[in-house]
Amino acid sequence: MTETAKGPASYFPSIEKKYGRPIAEWKALIQSSPLTKHMELVSWLKTEHGLGHGHANALVAHTLADGR
């Protein structure tokens, strides 16, 4: 039986499908950004990389929870 992802990770399959990049690549991009605040990073992903708000928010939340 497979465990269903919860929280921000539940968005990961649709993010990979829609934007064509693996989650590890998005997380590395966030980690390499000079921005540090959650909403700054979300806005940056939306404006510079064309992500929707929910997808950007999920990536940032998961990355920051990992200790960036």
Image (cartoon, rainbow, N blue to C red):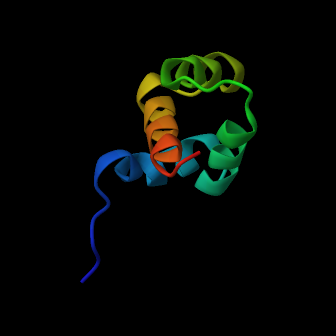
Q: In this view, does 50 lie to the left or right of 1?
A: right
Quarter of the image for residue 31 reads: top right
Coordinates of residue 39 in the picture (x, y in percent): 50, 19
Coordinates of residue 62 in the picture (x, y in percent): 46, 46
Q: Residue at x 64, y 20 (%)?
A: 44
Q: In this view, does 58 lie to the left or right of 19?
A: left
Residue extending farthest to the bottom is 1
Q: Is residue 4 visible?
A: yes
Q: Residue at x 62, y 41 (%)?
A: 19
Q: How many labels does the image show?
A: 0
Q: Can residue 20 be seen in this view?
A: no
Q: Which residue is drawn at 70% across and 48% down?
A: 28
Position of the N terminus by quadrant: bottom left
Q: In this view, does 22 lie to the left or right of 33?
A: left
Q: Residue at x 59, y 45 (%)?
A: 68
Q: In this view, does 60 lie above or below 22?
A: above
Residue nearer the viewer, 6 or 67 = 67
Q: Is residue 11 above or below residue 6?
A: above
Coordinates of residue 16 in the picture (x, y in percent): 56, 50
Residue nearer the viewer, 54 or 33 = 33
Quarter of the image for residue 4 reads: bottom left
Q: In this view, does 8 lie to the left or right of 50?
A: left
Coordinates of residue 17 in the picture (x, y in percent): 55, 50
Residue extending farthest to the front is 67
